[in-house]
Image (spheres, grey):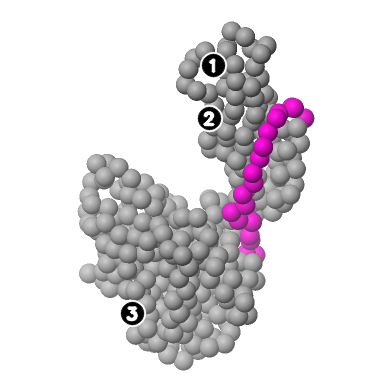
């Protein structure tokens, strides 16, 4: 068994449903310390974080990732115990196998090997690890970045180990993400009997034309790096459950994933204009979980692409698709940020798994990236 696979299994066996860490970071810290890293624990609330560095000065290359995982879900739908790693037919099963404990193992082993061969490497190798990526993302990377900014510590290049690949390891490298803006909408009506609608005000009927316009709207065309902005309703509820009562209130949640063609302010104004024009009586709370970010092709993306080409014999595509990641907190520091990890087909699903062969191949890609950027 390779050391990377063994470490992946050790991490999976530590139950770490967000925001719990389950001892994963202690295991990583022990090994990083032995490899010459200075490690700083930065816990906030129930969240465990650490910041580790080896070397000095710039450039600062940072591996970023998370030890927390999403809940296992229905245990009777799992073929194996989600927190007891099992290998079957070349696949390693377990919660976090793909998202993202295999990447954590790969970046740690790659760093151990690199510093053993290049003890006097240029610049600084760093790790920024949290247990709050799958949760609210309030006390994790966001808080660590605030600490680093207050100390004027800089990250030049950041490789996030999120599962970016689609059908083959290394086929996709993320160089940015769309922003995420959510709304909690309450439409106010007047409850009444369905036989006497003249004495009631149905909030479902009031919202329907506005909602139809919002869902059909073309927000923008995107651009060469980003898909067009999208609007999706995620939750909607109204009524008492009785068939003869007009509801007095409707509650809905919606989300906009937006490109650099939009701003938070422009999206908020557009939604509120549609609601007002349709004379909807509403209250609306807004939540911004991330702004769009883009790392233009440069030193980091070129090194990552070259490493993939050399180790995996394929040319990756550069993408900004998918959801959000903690890269949204690191990019505003002025860092170049890319995401490169295993295939994402089973993340957050029952029977989450990763190809055993890909774990070792990802380690090789990470190590080659380090060599291209920091070898003395």
Q: Which residue is mark 2?
A: 237
Asked if labels 3 and 1 touch by Cβ distance under 8 angstroms, the answer is: no
**Residue 30, numbered circle:** 3
Q: Earlier in the sequence, mark 1 or mark 2?
A: 2
Residue 299 is left or right of residue 270, and the answer is left
Q: Earlier in the sequence, mark 3 or mark 2?
A: 3
Q: Which residues are magenta?
A: 277-299
What kind of element bears circle 2?
strand
Residue 154 is left or right of residue 114, and the answer is right
Q: Find residue 281 and report its horizontal and vertical position in percent.
A: 70, 30
Q: Earlier in the sequence, mark 1 or mark 3?
A: 3
287 or 44, nearer to the observer: 44
**Residue 323, numbered circle:** none
Q: Find residue 1 and report its horizontal and vertical position in percent.
A: 22, 69
**Most extreme residue toward the top, as rendered?**
195
17 or 94, nearer to the observer: 17
């Amino acid at each position: 068994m390779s050391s990377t696979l063994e470490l992946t299994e050790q991490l999976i066996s530590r139950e770490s449903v967000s925001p719990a860490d389950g001892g994963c970071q202690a295991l990583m810290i022990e090994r990083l310390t032995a490899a010459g890293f200075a490690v700083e624990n930065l816990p906030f609330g129930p969240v465990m974080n650490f910041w580790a560095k080896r070397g000095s000065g710039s450039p600062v290359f940072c591996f970023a990732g998370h030890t927390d995982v999403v809940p296992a879900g229905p245990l009777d739908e799992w073929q194996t115990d989600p927190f007891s790693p099992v290998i079957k037919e070349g696949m390693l099963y377990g919660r976090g196998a793909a998202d993202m404990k295999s990447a954590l193992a790969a970046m740690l082993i790659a760093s151990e090997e690199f510093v053993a061969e290049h003890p006097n490497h240029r610049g600084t190798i760093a790790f920024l690890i949290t247990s709050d990526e799958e949760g609210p993302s309030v006390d994790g990377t966001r808080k660590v970045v605030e600490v680093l900014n207050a100390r004027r510590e800089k990250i030049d290049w950041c490789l996030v180990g999120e599962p970016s690949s689609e059908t083959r390891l290394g086929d996709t490298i993320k160089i940015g993400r769309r922003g995420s803006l959510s709304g909690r909408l309450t439409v106010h009506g007047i409850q009444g009997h369905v036989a006497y609608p003249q004495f009631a005000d149905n909030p479902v009927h009031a919202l329907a034309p506005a909602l139809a316009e919002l869902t059909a709207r073309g927000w923008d065309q995107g651009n060469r790096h980003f898909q067009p902005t999208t609007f999706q309703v995620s939750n909607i509820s109204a009524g008492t459950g009785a068939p003869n009562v007009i509801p007095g209130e409707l509650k809905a949640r919606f989300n906009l994933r937006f490109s650099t063609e939009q701003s938070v302010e422009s999206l908020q104004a557009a939604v509120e204009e549609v609601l007002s024009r349709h004379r909807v009586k509403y209250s609306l709370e807004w939540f911004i979980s991330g702004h769009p970010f883009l790392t233009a092709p440069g030193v980091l993306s070129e090194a990552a692409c070259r490493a993939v080409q050399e180790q995996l014999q394929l040319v990756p595509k550069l993408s900004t698709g998918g959801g959000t990641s903690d890269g949204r907190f690191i990019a505003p520091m002025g860092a170049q940020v890319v995401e490169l990890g295993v295939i994402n087909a089973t993340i957050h699903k029952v029977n989450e798994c990763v190809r055993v062969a890909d774990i070792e191949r990802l380690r090789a890609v990470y190590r080659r990236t380090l060599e291209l950027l920091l070898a003395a």
